[in-house]
Amino acid sequence: MIKVGIVGGTGYTGVELLRLLAVHPDVQLTAITSRKEDGLPVADMFPSLRGRVNLAFSAPDNVDLTKCDVVFFATPHGVAMAQAPALLAAGVKVIDLAADFRIKDKDVFEKWYKIPHTCPELLDEAVYGLVELNREQIKGARLIANPGCYPTTMQLGFYPLLKAKLIDTTSLIADSKSGVSGAGRKAEIGTLFSEASDNFKAYGVSGHRHTPETSAQLQRYTDSPVSLVFTPHLVPMIRGMHSTLYARLTSDIANEDLQALFEKEYAGSAFVDVMPFGSHPETRSTRGSNMLRLALHRPGNGNMLVILVVQDNLVKGASGQAVQCMNLMFGLDETTGLQQIALLP
Ligand SMILES: NC(=O)C1=CN([C@@H]2O[C@H](COP(=O)(O)OP(=O)(O)OC[C@H]3O[C@@H](n4cnc5c(N)ncnc54)[C@H](OP(=O)(O)O)[C@@H]3O)[C@@H](O)[C@H]2O)C=CC1
Ligand SMILES: CC(=O)N[C@@H](CCC(=O)OP(=O)(O)O)C(=O)O
């Protein structure tokens, strides 16, 4: 059994890790931390876990995480970078759900996250945990930078087109919407019921930290300079993410061939569903599951391609993706414990 520790077990990605790992056949939950809830039985805070998780939360300082085989950091940016060196030195693998190791350039990280990077020596080694694009590297990794939720949708949508050199890389557009759980469980005015429900707004239009993360990753797949405009929106739903991606085709290609390109690229991927051309994927078709669904459109048969991408921000956008990485790092089938079908309605 893989002994698992979770730092930050009371947040939305932490409890999502617990939901997935409590029934994972190869996992033994070993330590779950919370500074505020030290000593409280996990199932007292989350009754959905009664009878499934028998541990209590521990303060991070009171628990020996070196007895774990892998530790997930479901914490704000800056926490994993402080603890990863000691854990790695003790032979523990680390999966960070925050952004500490996603951006290879320390200066770019510090500019967008406005905190100093205290562990730049690990930036080169960290493997970006987007399984569909990095599967082989993840298998041998000790340290995973789990992707941001929006970047997952943007990369899986644009990647096949970039790789096949079919689009203008300087005019990529992503118009994305997230459910409110994307902002985490902490109290904030913007996510109060009376602020976020029955309302709709864009945010971060002049600059969101997921733009540099996504651009840098996409740049790995093309020699042409990548330029991306990304606009996130908050929508009044709990889970879910919908990205409408726009790309200008630079070559004359039939719709059937575009569809075949995506189907071939993701044929071996259990968690990327290429829907029939012209489909309208719904976020609820991924709710609670690790699936990401996408569909291609070509309005008026012109040279603008529209790619619709949906996922559950907490599963494929965070905790499910992290478990997918863990499976590969421990030699398991990547689908182990992740076969849930989406909830509907
Ligand atoms: N929500 C989402 O859809 C996604 C989130 N992420 C990323 O995952 C990470 C977790 O997000 P989310 O679950 O939403 O966050 P939450 O705010 O819901 O939870 C944060 C957790 O971290 C703990 N924590 C906070 N500060 C510290 C600290 N200094 N040391 C140790 N533990 C700490 C908190 O518990 P306590 O204060 O009691 O210790 C809590 O359990 C973030 O970096 C986020 O950006 C990534 C993709 C999607
Ligand atoms: C709705 C909402 O607020 N979403 C978050 C992003 C979700 C996320 O967790 O991304 P990181 O892991 O990169 O922080 C935001 O836009 O800040």
Image: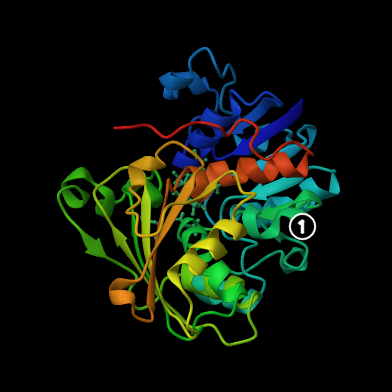
How far across and how far down the image is residue 240, in percent?
37, 47
In the rendered image of this protein, does residue 262 appear above or below residue 198? below
**Residue at screen point 34% across, 80% down:** 302
Q: Is residue 108 left or right of residue 243?
A: right
How far across and how far down the image is residue 14, in percent?
52, 38
**Residue at screen point 53% across, 65% down:** 155
In the rendered image of this protein, does residue 262 appear above or below residue 224? above
- What is the quadrant of the C terminus in the image? top left
* Mark 1 lies on residue: 137
Q: Is residue 186 left or right of residue 90?
A: left
Q: How many marks?
A: 1
Q: Is residue 246 left or right of residue 54?
A: left
Does mark 1 have its CB less than 8 Å from ligand 1? Answer: no
Q: Is residue 153 left or right of residue 104?
A: left
Q: Nearer the viewer, residue 97 or 83?
A: 97
Residue 114 visible in the shown view? no
Residue 261 visible in the shown view? yes
Q: Nearer the viewer, residue 272 or 116?
A: 272
- What is the quadrant of the N terminus in the image? top right
In the rendered image of this protein, does residue 34 appear above or below residue 22? below
In the rendered image of this protein, does residue 71 appear above or below residue 57? below
Give residue 8's quadrant in the image.
top right
How far across and how far down the image is residue 214, in percent?
53, 70
**Residue at screen point 62% across, 73% down:** 163
Q: Nearer the viewer, residue 252 or 43?
A: 252
